[in-house]
Image (cartoon, grey):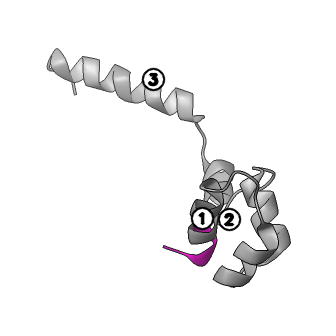
Amino acid sequence: MRPIDKALNDLASQDKPDYASIADKYGVHRSTLSRRHRKITTSREIATANFKSLLTPQQEKELVEYINKLSVFGLP
């Protein structure tokens, strides 16, 4: 697990987030930790995946369900 993910997990257990101490503890930037925790930004991996994706997650889910229904009827 990456340091930023460990820091976010640690923050999730706190009632009032202490970004500075958690950032120091895991060696991440306080501002990055704060933005990620408040969901202002996402990880680069997620942002890239969303940018390159041609279908929305909902469309992808519906397509998979449709394909699964077709396979029940023996259609490819």
Look at the numbered disc 3 and give the secondary structure of its residue. Answer: helix
The nearer-to-camera label among 3 and 1 is 1
At horizontal 25% and vertical 19% (from top left) the residue drawn is 70
The residue tagged 2 is: 44
At horizontal 55% and vertical 35% (from top left) the residue drawn is 57
Residue 73 sits above or below residue 38 on the image: above
Towards the viewer: 11 or 1: 11
**Alpha-carbon span between mark 3 and mark 1:** 35 Å
Q: Residue furthest right?
A: 31
Look at the numbered disc 1 and give the secondary structure of its residue. Answer: helix
Disc 1 + disc 2, Cβ < 8 Å: no
- Is residue 27 within the magenta segment? no
Q: In which quadrant of the rendered view does residue 34 lie?
A: bottom right
Q: Which mark is residue 10?
A: 1
Name the amino acid, label 3: Glu
The residue tagged 3 is: 62
Q: Residue furthest left?
A: 74
Residues drawn in magenta: 1-5
Q: In which quadrant of the rendered view does residue 6 lie?
A: bottom right
